[in-house]
Amino acid sequence: MSTHKQSRRIILQIRLFFRQFPAIPYLAKWLFISSVIGTCIGIASAIFLLTLDWVTDFRETHLWLIALLPLGGLIIGLLYKHLGKDIEAGNNLLIDTIHQPRTTIPFRMAPFIYIGTLVTHLLGGSAGREGTALQMAGAIADQFSKPFRLSESERKILLIAAVAAGFGSVFGTPLAGAIFGLEFFLIGRLRYDALLPAFLSAIIADLVTKLCQVQHTVYQIGFIPAVSVLYLLYAILVGIAAGICAATFSRTIHYINSLFKSKISYAPLRPFIGGVIVALAIWLMGTTKYIGLGIPTIVQAFHEPLPAYDFLLKMAFTILTLAAGFKGGEVTPLFFIGATLGNALSYIIPLPVGLLTGMGFVAVFAGATNTPLACMLMGIELFGHECGIYAAVACIVAYLLSGRTSIYQKQMIGEPKHSRFASLKGKRMNELE
């Protein structure tokens, strides 16, 4: 048999094999794409987390920097007004692009949000890191959509995988990150065609971040009692409180943001004035407990009772910071708010303080983002599987009780929370106001 005939026979056998197992080319394709974007996003998350730790430590040893918060706000405002108008929507731009892909997300979204977040934390604003991680991930990943010749549907999957990678790597929770990427843009429904890319990208990004010697915070719940009917009722009460807290946070931050826009027409002045208010409040209170990420307080909340008003003050500082136009995320402050809310409930609910703190930690986040499945997994990844049932109950109840609110205004309702809201299917959250 000639060499040409042998080659044709081999090619035909390969084609026949792939026809019988069509998932193999799909697996190979997304393994490659996920490896590329997961590696890039993991490195970006590592750089971000390491520099964020540095600026936080530097601020705490140079507290005079807080006096410069208004100036930092003005600089951020000018940067976005003159060079970043098309990326100012942030996470909502990512959600919009997943629903209706148009032009490629500008790469400058990544350095802009990175710089803006570092300035916010360096000078004493109260913000998180999830928003930064998601926007950096989305901007980086979307640059590959044209070189990889992805279709519109595949580009949507790419962005979902990028969000999963950004979230999973910045918090060290790849499973929760994968589900978050599938949940956060469409309430009540998951895109199963994005399941493999989301998990691969989140896991790879998390591994790369850890290879860069990034240390994630360890949270420990000392004692978790056996599940009982009474204790589940207590978990429902935590979920109710968390849902109300989440809805209050979401509604208030959007209201204050609208107030700043209606009263101050020149955009760069909004973070300047917001910075003045926050800096004065810090000076009057004489503490930096409620600014930045607030990780030390979150860790402390798992082990001992804290002042019952801590969650309210953190909520106020975060809303003022972000509504005024400073950059960063809402999620870590929501962890602080949820953890200290759970801690405050220990004064009236007879459950271990660590368990109440853990339930509040994930439940407020679930209610504010409408991502209950991701938050359940996050509870298990961060605190251990023993808390799984308690975390699940609190997250589900908080998700239901938060109603028609979200920190992400462009989220679309894919499946209403219950039949009473059936007419809202297909609408965006900002259309419900």
Image (spheres, rainbow, N blue to C red):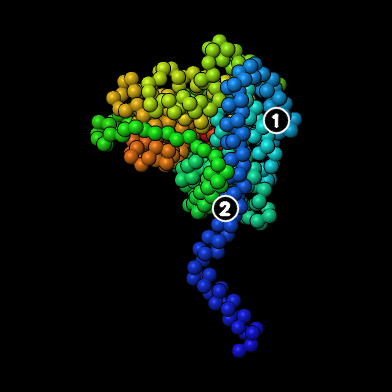
Numbered marks: total: 2
Q: Residue drawn at (50%, 63%), measured in percent from left and top? A: 23
**Would residue 156 be visible to someone looking at this image?**
no
Depth check: 310 or 244 in front?
310
In this rendering, the label closer to the viewer, 1 or 2: 2
Asked if 366 appears above or below 77 in the picture, the reply is below
Q: Which mark is residue 140?
A: none
Q: CA separation, marks 1 and 2?
A: 31 Å
Label 1 element class? helix
Corner quadrant of residue 275: top right
Q: Residue drawn at (49%, 41%), measured in percent from left and top? A: 172
Q: Residues within 10 Å of mark 1 (few under 14, many from 20)?
A: many
Depth check: 231 or 293 in front?
293
Answer with left or right where residue 88 lies relative to residue 293: right
Work out whether mark 1 precedes mark 2 in sequence or the reverse, and give the earlier one.
Answer: 2
Q: Residues within 10 Å of mark 2 (few under 14, many from 20)?
A: many
Q: Are marks 1 and 2 in contact (CB under 8 Å)?
A: no
Q: Which mark is residue 80?
A: 1
Residue type at mark 2 is Ser
Q: Which residue is mark 2?
A: 34
Residue ranking furthest to the right? 82
